């Protein structure tokens, strides 16, 4: 499936969107994945507790991007991709993280529009080593920004990408011949580098907006956080007249340790500003223990709140899963066990959730 990225073009200095974006983030630099919301005194998760702050107005956005009735799909093909430009690449994890994850902003100048929950295809430069004479294989990445991009002008996209490397157990070294071509290209890219884009693609994780007061339960591991970052920015950061969110967004994120957390300051800011509308629970497998004394995985955190979650699902809540494919068996087993404890036949419950379009899964 996917990995996450997000891109954003620089807003013209002095423009309406530039002023509003700067009013939303503290400081002069727009660093949406590490910078707190305006007028907030915060510390990172590794440094300490995020403190309460003054609530601020949402950012106005160019509403012409709300006019389309259907999501854009496959506007740019594999044989004729769009040539975007890298605006920035920044490592967004701490020194003790399990691997390197980067936040990548791509300028598409408004020519590759997308909706929240969709993906871009990226074609790394060079030839496919397995098929000489042909381009590299397209790799899909979940988009980590709203349709307006991180600078709110609709001309950039953000991706959240984990660098794929192979550790040889025999040599106890990384084997560069087996590294991920596309993820390494993106993480090594410099501002101004050209990037070939296909898509956008995907309808499975589109954010349902028919009911602005709906409940959205989001479960992620690692870079599977990407589409949820887009959801949450749309819900809590942008002033979109036709989507004034008043429901509940509940995020479950599973990573190895605090240094591996992604966009934590941003999510913590929402929790402080919208405590009635946003809940945020973490599963840190190398730092926390579950109720049985084992490592805390995201399914264990789900189990802690299982009664409440099942009640919300019974009332029509949507539940989303995005991340490594390997997370789903553990989650499914946990949900089945909890369901049986409540006298529920899980297979029937799952079938009903799918029929009602409450169950959304995109794994890779």
Image (cartoon, helix red, strand yellow):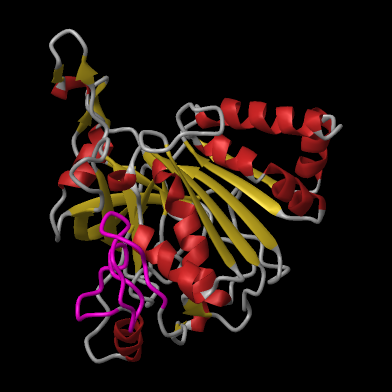
Q: Please, what is the dominant secondary structure of the magenta stretch?
A: loop
Q: Where 216 sits versus 219, above or below? A: below
Residue visible at 48% across and 26% down? 294
State which quadrant residue 260 falls in. top left
Let me know if residue 29 appears in the view. yes
Pick the front one: 68 or 311: 311
Across and down, in percent, residue 11 comes to: 27, 79
Q: Where 103 sits versus 64, above or below? A: above
Residue visible at 36% across and 33% down? 286
Asked if residue 46 lies in the magenta stretch, the reply is yes
Pick the front one: 355 or 268: 268
Across and down, in percent, residue 144 comes to: 41, 57
Pick the front one: 257 or 81: 257
Q: Residue furthest top?
A: 170
Name the side, left or right, on which 167 lies relative to 217.
left
Let me know if residue 81 appears in the view. no
Residue visible at 84% across and 29% down? 345
Pick the front one: 282 or 362: 282
Across and down, in percent, residue 344 comes to: 85, 33
Q: Where 240 sits versus 252, above or below? A: below
Asked if residue 303 lies in the magenta stretch, the reply is no
Across and down, in percent, residue 153 comes to: 37, 77
Give the magenta range: 26-52
């Amino acid at each position: 499936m996917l990995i996450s990225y997000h891109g954003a073009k620089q807003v013209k200095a002095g423009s309406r969107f530039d002023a509003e974006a700067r009013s939303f983030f503290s400081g002069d630099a727009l660093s949406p994945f590490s910078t707190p919301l305006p007028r907030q005194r915060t510390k990172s998760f590794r440094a300490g507790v995020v403190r309460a702050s003054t609530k601020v107005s949402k950012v106005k956005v160019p509403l012409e991007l709300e006019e389309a009735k259907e999501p854009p799909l496959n506007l740019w093909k594999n044989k004729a991709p769009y040539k975007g430009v890298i605006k920035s690449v920044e490592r967004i994890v701490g020194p003790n993280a399990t691997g390197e994850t980067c936040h990548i902003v791509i300028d598409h100048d408004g020519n590759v529009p997308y909706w929240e929950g969709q993906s871009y295809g990226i074609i790394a430069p060079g030839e496919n080593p397995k098929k000489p004479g042909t381009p590299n294989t397209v790799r899909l990445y979940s988009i980590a920004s709203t349709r307006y991009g991180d600078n709110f002008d609709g001309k950039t996209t953000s991706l959240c990408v984990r660098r794929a490397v192979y550790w040889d157990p025999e040599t106890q070294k990384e084997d560069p011949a087996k590294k991920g071509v596309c993820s390494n290209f993106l993480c090594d890219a410099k501002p101004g580098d050209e990037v070939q884009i296909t898509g956008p693609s995907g309808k499975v994780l589109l954010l349902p907006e028919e009911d602005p007061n709906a409940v959205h339960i989001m479960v992620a591991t690692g870079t599977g956080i990407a589409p949820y970052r887009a959801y949450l920015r749309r819900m809590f950061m942008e002033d979109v007249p036709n989507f004034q969110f008043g429901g509940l967004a509940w995020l479950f994120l599973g990573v190895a340790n605090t240094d591996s957390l992604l966009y934590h300051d941003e999510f913590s800011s929402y929790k402080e500003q919208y405590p009635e509308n946003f809940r945020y629970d973490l599963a840190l497998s190398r730092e926390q223990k579950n109720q049985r004394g084992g490592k805390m995985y995201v399914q264990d955190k789900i189990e802690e709140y299982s009664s409440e979650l099942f009640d919300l699902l019974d009332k029509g809540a949507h539940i989303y899963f995005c991340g490594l494919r390997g997370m789903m068996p553990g989650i499914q087993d946990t949900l089945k066990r909890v369901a049986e404890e409540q006298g529920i036949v899980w297979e029937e419950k799952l079938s009903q959730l799918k029929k009602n379009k409450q169950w959304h899964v995109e794994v890779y």
